[in-house]
């Protein structure tokens, strides 16, 4: 089995990995998406079990899909908890990759649950669906006629209602002005 600690960035990946069969530790920087894809496809072609650990990131969707396609196990870790396990305050990409590898090897990796891709796609469809089937959100609907005009500003906030009555009979222009002369 090969275990990989990956410090992921949108433009590159810094990885530290070890082959548990021979104990060989290696480090590598994958500069482009194409280089990373080639590296992981070659690993998958070898037929070896691979586990990749990385911090949670919203920028890694293509990478997550690639590993799922190649049936490479991906563990996503809680970035805040990983940060607390860092010994040195000064950090580098190499140190981050080594730290993630170390946490994976010591079984201390703060793994978080991530839904499968099928589940994510279904969640997206349900998120945008409305009961009437239109798919429109309520906050995108036009405001009813007079809705904005019926709100009255006071010194304590906004009061919804019927104009000057909501402000205690004070004309809108007089709000916020001193009544003593």
Image: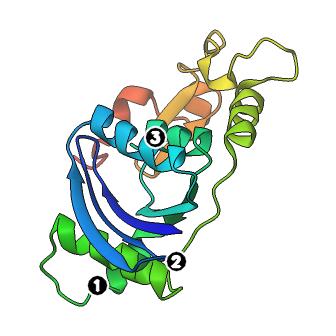
Q: Nearer the viewer, residue 164 or 52?
A: 52
Q: Quadrant of residue 102?
A: bottom left
Q: Earlier in the sequence, mark 2 or mark 1?
A: 1
In the rendered structure, are the residues bearing label 2 and label 1 in contact, judged by CB atoms less than 8 Å apart? no
At x 27%, y 46%, the residue is 178
At x 48%, y 76%, the residue is 21
- Mark 3 and mark 1: Cα distance apart in space: 31 Å
Q: Residues within 10 Å of mark 1 (few under 14, many from 20)?
A: some
Q: Which dot marks residue 86?
A: 1
Check the image and report above or below for 122 versus 18.
Answer: above
> What residue did someone put label 3 on?
41
- Mark 2 and mark 1: Cα distance apart in space: 13 Å
At x 50%, y 79%, the residue is 109
Q: Earlier in the sequence, mark 3 or mark 1?
A: 3
Q: Quadrant of residue 17?
A: bottom left
SS at badge 3: helix
Q: Is residue 65 left or right of residue 80?
A: right
Residue 161 locus on image (x, y percent): 65, 31
Check the image and report above or below for 24 versus 53.
Answer: below
Q: Nearer the viewer, residue 173 or 115?
A: 115
Residue 33 locus on image (x, y percent): 31, 35
Check the image and report above or below for 102 versus 60.
Answer: below
Farthest residue, direction left: 90
């Amino acid at each position: 089995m090969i275990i990989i600690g990956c410090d992921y960035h949108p433009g590159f990946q810094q990885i530290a990995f070890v082959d548990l069969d021979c104990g060989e530790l290696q480090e590598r920087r994958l500069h482009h998406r194409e280089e990373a894809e080639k590296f992981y496809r070659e690993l998958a072609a070898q037929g070896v079990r691979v586990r990749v650990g990385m911090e949670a990131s919203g920028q890694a969707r293509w990478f997550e899909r690639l590993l799922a396609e190649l049936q490479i196990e991906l563990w996503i870790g809680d970035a805040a908890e990983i940060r607390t396990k860092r010994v040195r305050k000064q950090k580098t990409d190499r140190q981050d990759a080594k730290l993630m590898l170390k946490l994976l090897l010591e079984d201390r990796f703060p793994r978080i649950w991530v839904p499968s891709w099928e589940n994510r796609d279904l969640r997206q469809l349900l998120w945008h669906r409305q009961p009437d089937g239109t798919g429109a959100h309520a906050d995108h609907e036009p405001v009813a006629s007079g809705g904005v005009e019926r709100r009255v500003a006071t010194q304590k906030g906004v009061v919804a209602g019927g104009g000057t009555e909501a402000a205690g009979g004070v004309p809108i222009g007089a709000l916020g002005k001193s009544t003593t002369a």
